[in-house]
Amino acid sequence: TAGITQAPTSQILAAGRSMTLRCTQDMRHNAMYWYRQDLGLGLRLIHYSNTAGTTGKGEVPDGYSVSRANTDDFPLTLASAVPSQTSVYFCASSDSGLGSPLHFGNGTRLTVT
Amino acid sequence: RKEVEQDPGPFNVPEGATVAFNCTYSNSASQSFFWYRQDCRKEPKLLMSVYSSGNEDGRFTAQLNRASQYISLLIRDSKLSDSATYLCVVQGGGADGLTFGKGTHLIIQP
């Protein structure tokens, strides 16, 4: 089934360690996004990419980096994790242009201890 | 004023009733609008797009009021399975172009 896949599903990570959250889509969507969702704060955009080779900062980019080497993959890296990065992370993709809804992955539940 | 505002609820509604909630947006240049549904600990899923003329999908009706800058979602004959959080999404303006509301929590009671 076509869609967007995230890995891992969940992870416990020691503070100070690095980690890459993986996101792959097979819908050939140009745009991809990383959100974090925290209780009471809703979905907040971390980084986005409108097309392969370009990335942009969202609302809460600090402590995170992304790359977009090709259309399908959009990994999110935490270089040195901190407890405040404990959250549920969702990757999403969409066709370019207005009127194109987002398709979300299943999410990664990350706990930084 | 927040860009996209929703009443967080929870809305407690008996099964079979009709429930409606709104979402207001501040950017008058917004051009596309969506309702998403999110179940506990799951990813948001597209419920329906919202068109200028309003649109209906089974028991669900979405409407857009550009003059007052809000969209609405009406659910008729509510089912237990409708219990979820409903997210409003507004598109248009800004680099990423998408703004999410924090969601309205709906609980359908037997």
Image (tube, coloured by chain):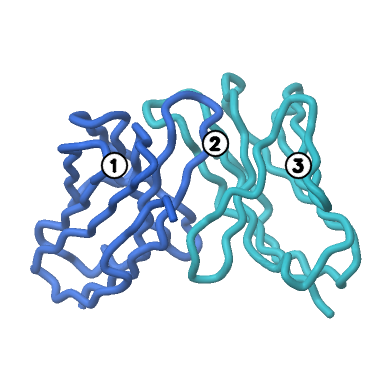
Q: Nearer the viewer, mark 3 or mark 2?
A: 3
Q: Is residue A89 left or right of residue B58?
A: left
* Amino acid type, mark 2: Glu
Furthest residue toward top: B29
* Amino acid type, mark 3: Ser
Return the chain for callout 2.
B
* Amino acid type, mark 1: His
Q: Position of residue A15 (x, y in %)?
A: 13, 72
Q: CA distance from mark 3 to mark 2?
A: 16 Å
Q: Quadrant of residue B104?
A: bottom right
Instruction: Residue under label 1, please give it.
Output: A47
Instruction: Residue under label 2, please give it.
Output: B3
Q: Is residue A1 above or below residue B100?
A: below
Give the residue at x 58% y 24%. B30
Q: Is residue B69 left or right of residue A106?
A: right
Q: Colour of chain B?
A: cyan
Instruction: Residue under label 3, please give it.
Output: B72
Q: Is residue A83 left or right of residue B43?
A: left
Return the chain for callout 1.
A
Q: Which chain comes out blue in the rendered image? A: A
Q: Secondary structure at mark 1?
A: strand
Give the residue at x 16% y 64%. A81
Identify which residue, A85 or B35, lies in the foreground: B35
The lab-note entry on whether marks 1 and 2 share a chain reads no
Kindly identify which numbered label has been placed on residue B85: none
Q: Is residue B55 above or below residue B5?
A: above
Label located before the other in sequence (3 or 2): 2
Q: Quadrant of the C terminus of chain B?
A: bottom right
